[in-house]
Amino acid sequence: MKKEPSEPAPIFVRNLQRKIACDRMALERFARRALLLCRQEPGAGLTSHGDLGVLVVSDRRMAQLHRRFMQIAGPTDVITFQHGEIFISVETAERQAAAYGTSLEHELRLYLVHGLLHLHGFDDHDPAARRRMHSVQERIVRLASRNTPGVRTLE
């Protein structure tokens, strides 16, 4: 069966770490809604992908990826690969949630949307692009949280 161009690519979430509990199914429901909202933004990157994978990993695994592919030591919050994989560090998300007074779920959603926007062609290397991307990702996190059954909003 051929996929229609307007049909969103399937997206799945895998939890590949055992240190911190996270609701994989709720994050996957959120990811489906966020994907639809991201695709409504100007850009074409998400229309060229097949399946998209969101992989929740430990800081240790993230640090390995960070060093291997970006030559930077230590973990980071999210790494996006242009072939459709988004790696998210749950330990970094937990630390950032404590630092910013948010929740683990909010940080995971934020990183997921950040990765989707990168796949859609957004960039955050200069200040103007970073401000635009931040604004769009905050709006998408808010809307996808509000409109996804089984996903709590933070408001």
Image (cartoon, rainbow, N blue to C red):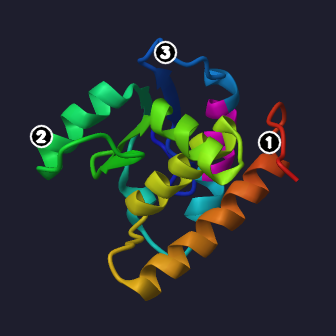
- The residue type indicated by label 2 comes to Arg
**Pointer 1 or 3: first along the chain:** 3
Q: Which residues are magenta?
A: 27-34
Q: Is residue 98 magenta?
A: no
Across and down, in percent, residue 82 comes to 28, 52
Residue at 68% x, 45% y is 106
Residue at 51% x, 37% y is 10
Q: Which residue is mark 3?
A: 19
Spatial CA span between label 1 and label 3: 26 Å
Spatial CA span between label 2 and label 3: 23 Å
Q: Dot 2, how many residues are within 10 Å of its Cα: few (below 14), some (14-19), or many (20+)?
A: few
**Pointer 2 or 3: first along the chain:** 3
**Picture layout, residue 78 above or below residue 152:** below
**Picture layout, residue 94 above or below residue 37:** above
Which element carries disc 1, helix, strand or loop?
loop
Q: Nearer the viewer, residue 11 or 153?
A: 153
Across and down, in percent, residue 14 comes to 47, 22
Q: Which residue is mark 2?
A: 68
